[in-house]
Image (cartoon, rainbow, N blue to C red):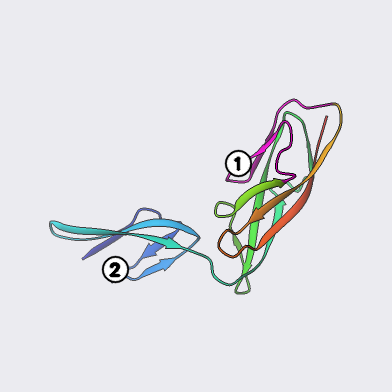
Amino acid sequence: MFWSTDTPTVALVDPGGLVRGIAPGTAVITGSQKTTSGSANITVTLGGITSIQVSTTDGLSSVAYGSSEQFVATATANGEQINVTNSVTWSTNPRSIPNVSISNTGLLTTTSGPAGNDQFVVVALDPTTGIFGQINFLVHP
């Protein structure tokens, strides 16, 4: 029997067919032997989350209008630090800020803005547990 995964960053499968979760996400596990094969979709979730910390990749707490900033979410789960940037729900508080948007991967983008500063909170929410982390951020002219 031959086993494979389409997303080894999410799940690995050993020669005996035992699947091991690596990071939150989805993967397709396929088993095949000669001319017969079958697949199963799996979802890997992170259990035991006690907190989420939000930071920026470059350590900045502000950017100028017309710039972007990448945020990172790190969960503490079962005593380990795990990057959950791509499995949390990203938002800002307030939710709507003129000239500012945040993607589902934590990339904040801005367009040309007003003459003043906009200060807000960037939030990373684990949709399974409701646990969230946040960071204050500022966009300036």
Rendered residue at 65%/63% (across/down): 131
Q: Which mark is residue 74?
A: none
**Residue 126 found in image quarter:** bottom right
Task: Answer whether residue 25 is visible to the viewer in this image.
Answer: yes
Rendered residue at 45%/58% (across/down): 10
Q: In the rendered structure, which segment of residues is drawn in magenta? A: 93-114
Q: Amino acid at mark 2?
A: Pro
| Residue that badge 2 annotates | 15
Q: Nearer the viewer, mark 1 or mark 2?
A: 1
Is 45 placed left or right of 81 in the picture? left
| Residue that badge 1 annotates | 103
Question: Disc 1 vs disc 2: Cβ atoms closer than 8 Å?
Answer: no
Is 65 placed left or right of 80 in the picture? right
Q: Can you give x and y, in whole percent of width and height, for residue 29 in the image? A: 32, 59
Q: Is residue 55 above or below residue 68?
A: below
Rendered residue at 39%/63% (across/down): 12
What is the crowding at mark 2: few (fewer than 14 residues within 10 Å), some, or many (at least 20)?
few
